[in-house]
Amino acid sequence: MRIIVCIKQVPDTEELGKVKINPATNTLKREGVSSIINPFDENAVEEALRLRERKGGKVTALSMGPPQAEEALRKTLAMGVDRAILLSDKAFAGADTLATSYVLAVAIKKIGEFDLILSGKQAIDGDTAQVGPGIAEWLSIPQLTYIRKLEVNDNKVRAERVLEDSFEVVETSLPCLVTVTKDINEPRYPSLRGLLKAKKEEIPIWSCHDLSVERKRVGADGSPTQVIKIFTPQPPGKGEILSGEISEVADRLIREIKKRKIV
Amino acid sequence: MDFALNDDQKMILELVDEVSEKEFAPRADEISAKGEFPAENIKKLTELDLFGITIPEKYGGLGMDYLTWTLVSERISRACTTTGLIFGTNLLCTYPLLQFGNEEQKKKYLPPLAKGETLGAFALTEPEAGSDAGNVQTTAIKEKDSYVLDGTKIFITNGEVAGTYIIIANMDRARGPRGLTAFIVEKGNPGFTFGQHFDKMGLSALPNVELIFDNCRIPSENLLHKEKRGFRVAMRTFAAGRIGVGIGALGVAEAAFEKAREYSKERVQFGRSISSFQAIQHILADMATGIETAKYLLYRAAWLLDQNEPFEKISSMGKLYASEVAMKVATKAVQVFGGYGYTKDYPVERYMREAKLFEIIEGTSEIQRGVIANFILKE
Ligand SMILES: Cc1cc2nc3c(=O)[nH]c(=O)nc-3n(C[C@H](O)[C@H](O)[C@@H](O)COP(=O)(O)OP(=O)(O)OC[C@H]3O[C@@H](n4cnc5c(N)ncnc54)[C@H](O)[C@@H]3O)c2cc1C
Ligand SMILES: Cc1cc2nc3c(=O)[nH]c(=O)nc-3n(C[C@H](O)[C@H](O)[C@H](O)COP(=O)(O)OP(=O)(O)OC[C@H]3O[C@@H](n4cnc5c(N)ncnc54)[C@H](O)[C@@H]3O)c2cc1C
């Protein structure tokens, strides 16, 4: 199987408190915050590797981002993907989900034939969950989103799709795009051998010149979305902290719960 | 002198730290309480390729140095003493194979050990031969193209779970150490069985097993090194193994210290945190100083080993010092925790029980002082 996994580098969740927003551009200030692979994308990589282990083939990791996103791609190489490609160009900056999915789709076309595209269900920073579906639309292939279980047999894809409080079983055929949830698998750690090998690997960087993109569709110019204002919403009410002896606190808590008819 | 880690070491330790903190540390209490072999942890070590660190690439390993191994082992031990010891004990099998094995033996036994498909063990101790290592009673008799082993080994770490065993037997009991001979014995070899599992003060999840050899016939190509040269094999193995045992002790010390430090800042008595009392501060300062000192002795021993320079004296010092630091730090950690420290609600009582082992195995503290004295009086 020829599998392409889209990964995004995001600020470390454990340091999210440190992330500041640049009021002038309404974008994230990433300086001083360590970066990780978007956690759902690690699940996507894991699923790709498991499919390759079962069916053979080749896994390509793809990311659009600044030059330092190379670090995230290198980790996917250490986990075991066959090759990684970085899409990086100043012209790509300021992209919204439309422009992001466009560039990714053009790059996928350049990679050539593929059977399956995997992505995370959403990025933990932007959180829109639109890039995966966007890519599928640009490529005119079927998409299965929020997948927690995936089976591929010959040309057939059967998957469990997570709903609010249940799941549905959906089917389609290859080639298609699948976005995955955390429940689909437990991502592996890279091995030492993988780390040492990945360190030496070349990661090609494709810029605007390498891709046959329409310039007006990339970056800020290609992004109809404009972020007018970004703010941290105020919590709806003030919480109350009960303190004292455990038994006393428990009693008061039960009284409050009853009083407010929570149960 | 260069104390800096290289980029590979940093990258590897970052990964090992992540796995140790996320996977090993949270389960350490439960593993000890249940006394179950931590198979999941060992699987993780295997998936990460950690068993192959010091084994050359041509035998399926990563061909890295003992210092890197030492740094990795420290991380694992800090998170879970049991897992650290299982990991460390493997070296007692791979090191003598690398040092004394012939090409066929290396090709046959090292790759599965490097991949972690097989665990290793080393057995010398017997009821009559502990500190007195030369007094091994297990016999080996040459019969045509095989050797026949008879006797019993006790306390053997990784016993039963290991697949490859380095066994020290005696071909001439009258000559004591000069009769000792080392052999490679595979689990499942007819005549080789397992006896009792020892019930211990701590580390209940660490397998320590009796090995029984009853008319156990092994092919002559399983002789390791030369007949009656097993004492040298054992002493070299112990010298390297002491780095591993020392680093295990250091791991316990670091874990106990960290818990004591955190607790001292949280625990309030007389209206302030106990870390504001000078008496507690001095305990913490002594702990940290001991840990730092032990660390560099052990790193240096590993570094000397990597440079092919004599390392035996320093590894003995490192093992002696680190194990005594571990015992002191763990005992003091219980003190910092007060009454809570004596309960099983906190891990410090476990550390104290675990730390004690390190003053005993791989040569007791008394034996270590003898070894060190021998070196310095000859210099
Ligand atoms: C604070 C903030 C607010 C924003 N608000 C908006 C907005 O309202 N509307 C809008 O259109 N844009 C917005 N953007 C921009 C948007 O986040 C990113 O530009 C967009 O590229 C990625 O969308 P996402 O992070 O929501 O990813 P999602 O669509 O949530 O990501 C889903 C999956 O797509 C893949 N993917 C996403 N990005 C990449 C990439 N760069 N390379 C490879 N694979 C990728 C990953 O597999 C990921 O798991 C905002 C950005 C910020 C920082
Ligand atoms: C958990 C555990 C794991 C072990 N794993 C292994 C293993 O994998 N392989 C293996 O071969 N062995 C193993 N051992 C055995 C261990 O190495 C021995 O227990 C240790 O070497 C001490 O030997 P002994 O128990 O016979 O004590 P003894 O030798 O009887 O010592 C008793 C006391 O006398 C002191 N003493 C003895 N001789 C002298 C002397 N000459 N001068 C001063 N003091 C002396 C000792 O220091 C000690 O305090 C293990 C033991 C334990 C408890």
Image: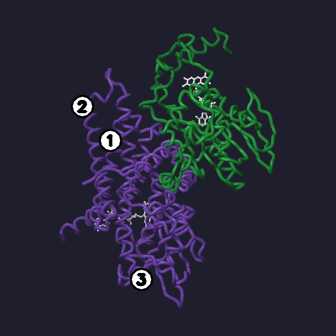
B235 left or right, relative to B189: left
Expressed as whole percent of the image width and height from the top left, the position of residue A10 reads 53, 33
**Counting other residues with Cα less than 10 Å from the Cα at mark 1, is it few (<14), some (14-19), or many (20 or more)?**
many
Is residue B192 shown above or below A213?
Answer: below
Q: Nearer the viewer, mark 3 or mark 2?
A: 3
Q: Identify the mark at residue B226; answer none if there is no mark.
A: 3
Q: Which chain is green?
A: A
What residue is shown at x 42% (from left), y 49% (from top)? B75
What residue is shown at x 45% (from left), y 38% (from top)? B346
Ligand 1, by image quadrant, is: top right
Inspect the image, locate mark 1, and give the three-letter code of the amino acid beneath it: Lys
Quarter of the figure that contains the C terminus of chain B: bottom left
Disc nearer the start of the sequence (2/1):
2
Inspect the image, locate mark 2, and give the three-letter code of the amino acid beneath it: Gln
Secondary structure beneath dot 1 equals helix
What residue is shown at x 71% (from left), y 48% (from top)? A113
Q: CA distance from mark 3 to mark 2?
A: 59 Å
Inspect the image, locate mark 3, and give the three-letter code of the amino acid beneath it: Lys
Q: Identify the mark at residue B278; answer none if there is no mark.
A: 2
- Chain bearing tag 3 is B
Q: Quadrant of residue B334?
A: top left
Expressed as whole percent of the image width and height from the top left, the position of residue A142 reads 77, 37
Q: Nearer the viewer, mark 3 or mark 1?
A: 3
- Chain bearing tag 1 is B
Q: Which residue is mark 1?
A: B332
